[in-house]
Image: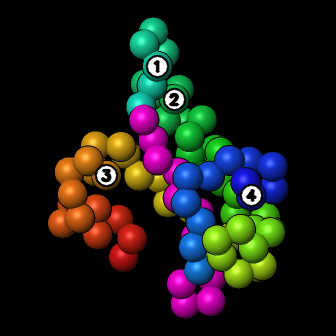
């Protein structure tokens, strides 16, 4: 949890906390464009919030990464560029 919002992964790199949101895609019957807008808005809310030190240093979140679930399943080679 970061500022009361759930995140899938939280880590510290180069002195900054990064929150990772794994995007499973829209639920059946949900507009994909709306789902994407809400996911990005959720990520925007996390920037600057205190991490609480759960899995990372106790400093604010400086970066949020949205990772489509298919990239996680595709393997390290396709996932690595997301974190650069």
Q: Is residue 7 magenta?
A: no
Q: Are marks 3 and 4 in contact (CB under 8 Å)?
A: no
Quickly name the residue at label 4.
Answer: 2
Q: Which residue is mark 3?
A: 72
* Relative vertical location of residue 66 with respect to residue 80 in this rendering, above or below: above
Of tags 3 and 2, which is closer to the observer?
3
Q: Nearer the viewer, residue 44 or 61?
A: 61
In this rendering, does residue 56 appear at all? yes
Name which residue lies at 64% across and 71% down. Answer: 55
Helix, strand or loop status at disc 2? helix
Where is residue 46? Give x, y as percent: 70, 57
Single out the mark in the foreground, 4 or 2: 4
Q: Report, in whole angstroms, how far the alpha carbon at label 4 lies from the one at label 2.
A: 21 Å
Query: Which of the marked residues, 3 or 4, is nearer the chain's N terminus?
Result: 4
Identified at 80% across, 69% down, the residue is 52
Q: Are marks 4 and 2 in contact (CB under 8 Å)?
A: no
Nearer the camera: disc 1 or disc 3: 3
């Amino acid at each position: 949890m970061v500022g009361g919002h759930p995140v899938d992964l939280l880590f510290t790199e180069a002195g900054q906390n990064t929150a990772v949101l794994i995007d499973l895609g829209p639920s059946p019957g949900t507009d994909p464009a709306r789902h994407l807008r809400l996911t990005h808005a959720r990520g925007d809310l996390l920037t600057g919030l205190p991490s609480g030190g759960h899995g990372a240093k106790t400093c604010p979140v400086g970066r949020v990464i949205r990772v489509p679930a298919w990239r996680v399943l595709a393997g390290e080679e396709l996932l690595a560029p997301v974190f650069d």
